[in-house]
Image (tube, grey):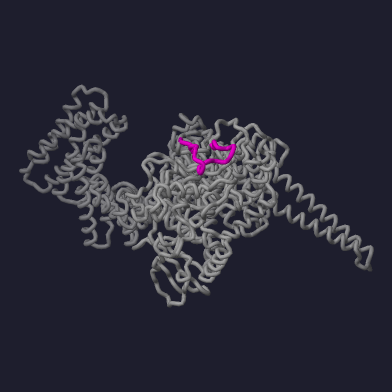
Amino acid sequence: KCNRHSTMEQQSPPLMTQEEGGLGNDQRGSSRNTLATVTSMLKETSLLVRPMLTSSFEEDEEENFGCLENTSNCQPTSNDTLLQLLPGESVSDLSRRLPAPENYTKIPLPTVPREYLKWKFHDLHLLVGSEALIYRDPHTVAVRLADADDLRKALANHEEKVRRGDFIADHQMARLQQQGKPSYAQALDQQVTKNATSAPYFLAPDYDRVQLQTCIVPSSTTPLGGLLSGRAQNQQNHQATLANNNGNPVCTVLDAYLDNIIANVPQLALCLREKGFIQSVKLLETEDIPSSLMLTSTLETTDSFSISKIDTIADEKPLFSPHIMDMNATTLLGFLKTNCTRNNSTYLLQREAGHSNIQLYDISSISAQRQRKWIWWLAMMSYRFALRLRDLNTHLSEPPARRRVFRSRQRSLLENALNLLDDLSDMGGSANETLCAAVCESLAESFLGGNITNNVDAASFEDQQQKVEKDSALERPATISSPPYANVTVDALNKAQDHLQIGIKKLLPLLERIKAKVEGKSRHCKDHCNEGIEKNRTVVVKVSDDDSSSNSSNSDDDSITHEGLSLELQSISLQLFSLHHKLINVSLRLTEHHLSNYYSSSAMQALRTSARTIAGAISMLRQQESSDEAHLQLSLRYQFTWLWEHCGHFARSFAADDLWRERGHACGDDIISVLRDVENVLSVETDRFHPDDWFNFVLSDAPITDNTGGLVSLYEVSSIVEKEFATTIAEVQKATKVLDQQKLIQRDQRRVLVAASVSYSRAIGIFEEILRIEENNSKKGNKDGNNTFTHDLSASNDFLSLLRQRLGDSCNEIGKILLRELRHLMTSGNTDIPVAETMLHSAQFWFNEGLQAFELCNDLRNLALLRCNLCQCWKIRANAGFASNAKSTHAEECLQTAANHLQKAHEALGERDVDQFTWDMVSQELAATFLVLGVRRRQSALGGGATPVVAQALRLSPGQERGIVEPMEQALHIYEEYANAHQAAAANYQLALFYTKVWTCQRDEAKTREKLSAAFTNYAAAHAYFGRAPPGNESTFVILCLDLSNLYAAVSGEEFLTKALSRCLDTTECFSKRSIEAARCRGDPAGWFEKMETLASSVEDRIFKLLVSLVKLEKESDTAGLSTQYKDLYRTALTSKMLIQKQKIADDVASRMAASHELLSVVKTAHLKS
């Protein structure tokens, strides 16, 4: 059957047997039926046939089974066997029996069948492409739609031929004459009849004993190419035969019968149609199709629409014998298996119309005879078979091993076709550039079909294969986040890249020649038109004559020629674009592999190749004058986006991974140089671009470059930007020089990160343009009812979010580097304020860019982290050196802005469960900011220290008090919520200092008591923590005790003075030897000892002052002099101090602190006893 595709292979175990799902015993004869016209397809699939049997046709001595005279041995003995002819045939007659090569190359490729079926035909395993419509649920039945009138006319014509004797069925034919010998059907019939004369049907024959009347033409040294020349008569006969077969009822019945046999379907539902409507449905058993399908009763549609079963009429003879057809096909296929045994050989099978002889020719040696037309024919047939194998490999769910075999054969055929075309060009024939490029493209596609591994099942591989085939088309790929060919191995990608580059090299010279012809023709037409204009100017009145008509016709011919060249130019450009398009995807996929393995030089080369190929693809697409290439333009935008994404990933990976230096042997200048080369290649033809051209996207700057006025680009990677209305170019240059003094690795990291941000920004800008285009096209398509620009919105958003996340990450890293350098500059001692402010502004710029990117992609965690970094910038800006004006509230405003950023981070997260770690980190930072803000506001309003404010004029308004207290209380609340006792104690201490300063200037006694009580409460909380705090907090505790002692002393009365003394004595342990040893173990600097020595002196002085006050108060209250408690305590303290001073103490801080500890211990012990 002409539209079936079949392959034959040896398999073990067989795909299907009668016991495993074949037909039953009652259908045993039907199960062996196959294609009656399988020979026509073997012309197209002969290269797919592999020998499966080693036995050849055996020669029979009986007369009825003899072969042709002089050719009784049909099996060639060797490759040197001479050309064998039919009896009485000359060598010149052989050319008449073979059509011309054009007769084969003009046969169109069959379309992809509805499904491929695996069919076991005797010992052959066939893969058949079937167009049958099979309904399998709940009962299996084949559905066939036919026009009732056409079938009736065909039946009437057939009956007329039978009456005239023009048609005799094979089972009715008594004897067919073929060169004076019986036909194979007769011989087989006689053999079967001898064994079982009483059988009503033919039994299964001994297929090894049946021979065909054939002629075998093996390969030889004879120049076959000169002998095989077709004639027009043969081609006309062939076409007439095909036309007659289309209306032949035998072919119709055979087609229906084979559809059911091959699909293993027991019934056929024949739907008869008249005037476009189905009038009747007839249900036939498969074994009844040869005898019942073309009956008058079957084709009747007089009954109303119903389903009826047609009973088999015993008297009716079938139009063909399924048994004889089965034997014929089996014998023919066995003959081919036996003789088509050489690998990489080309065979030609032919049966002329009106003849029963079948000729098999081995024509592989034709290509070596330097016959150009036959070399061309062999090349075309190889290419044709390769395309068929590609279709089989694409649409079949075969095991991976079978797919590898198909792909290997396909590549071998394509390489053979390419070699033959090259030989044809060397012989002086046409170069066939477009065809060679198409073969190269097919070779590349054979490597891009997916990586077949042994651990991949057939079903999953088929899904991958279909996805890859879909992605390789010129439309927008299905995978948005990355180029196609994700499952292809690196070796296959490299080979595909080589073939694509070869195809491009073959087509580019042809394109240049066509361009030159088009330009020359355009100039010729222009000159011709100018001459015509001059002639019309000089001759005003002129009657048209023959000459003018001739000139007009010549002008038309010229215009037609020019139009033809233009069309040829466009077609070649489109083919080149296809090659460029695939090469871009392959190069980008190779780039991904090289980047994942630290192959720096290979990655750089792949990026440059991708850029050059994109520029070439744009040039090819510019040749197209049609406006229907929007999907191609869109695909280029996708590839442009992927290119810059890979550039950004290369730079970002280099900055984050030191292995690029160790394994990749690359430096930052190498990365930046590659990215600059990519940009230069894509913008080489700037002067030729029109502002409204669609390809201007390759020239547009990155959004981040536009936002900085060109200060951030691939040529300006210093990371320093200009501040509005303040920073000058000179300050930018100074800051850049400071950054250039970094170490090489740090400088490379910063510069490469800037390049990465520029690359990501450009990719985002192009992809946003893609989404706008697709959205507009989608709206337009929905409005017109023809939406061809459908896309996966979720996948697009995910890819855009990924790009924005990478951009935000790069910007954040740049800002962190600048902030680190700024802190180093400020702590160095020689701070240049303008330079520092420029660096701070630049850091804020990069943080804001990252913040914007994370906001657009709704990355809440990174959004919160960016706001924390911005908070740090504003805390640094709160330094007095960065004040841009004389405002006293500069620090408070900066700190408030920092706190606002952190509060917005909380708002973005929404709740703690979204990201607990980030939420807690932001909360801790927010608490610290609030605490610093409250302290700065207190210092700004009340000054430093803990001395109470006495003047009423300095009393704060309620709003001012809230501005100071609320941030501290918020910080205290956060610290208590997270059980941060240390920071909570610090917050209580700062609140206590505030209340200590304001309790004395309240408007009434109630407010005074309220503030004083709040001060004692906060002091008590802070004292309770620091009193038992771990070592290292001694200085803080001593200062806290001194401040609390001062507050107690400020309140009159013996009780408060005693508490003040007790708080001073609480610091005794802070000066002990254990504290000193702990400080030495911690490695604290000498500053700690100096601070503690100063504090020890302050504590001693404070204790003696308090004792003096208590002694004076005791004397005033006890006039009789009976109470001497504080007087004795004071005497003990003085005695102890004098004794210590008399002792020889080493002149070091630790010794002096030990002396203070001894004094405080004596006083504390005496105080406790009293």
Question: Taking 937 as reference, is 581 left or right?
Answer: right
Please say whether residue 1093 is one of the residues in the magenta stretch. Answer: no
The quadrant of the image that shows the C terminus is top left
Q: What residue is at 44 percent from the left and 73 percent from the top? A: 280
Percent x, y of residue 209: 46, 41
- Whether residue 714 sits left or right of residue 1124 in the image: it is right
Whether 127 is drawn above or below 598: the answer is: below
Q: Visible in this render: residue 676?
A: no
Q: Residue at x 24, y 51 (%)?
A: 976
Q: Is residue 566 above or below residue 164?
A: above
How far across and how far down the image is residue 858, in percent?
A: 41, 55
Q: Nearer the viewer, residue 1127 or 1009?
A: 1009
For residue 1137, say whether it is visible: yes
**Which of 741/614 is in front?**
614
Q: How many marks?
A: 0
Q: Main secondary structure of the magenta part?
A: loop
Residue 429 horizontal side relative to residue 485, left or right: right
Residue 778 picture location, percent across and down: 52, 63
State the image coordinates of residue 788 (x, y, percent, origin top left).
53, 62
Please give the range of residues in magenta. 54-74
Q: Quadrant of residue 1035?
A: top left
Query: Is 1091 or 798 nearer to us in this picture?
Result: 798
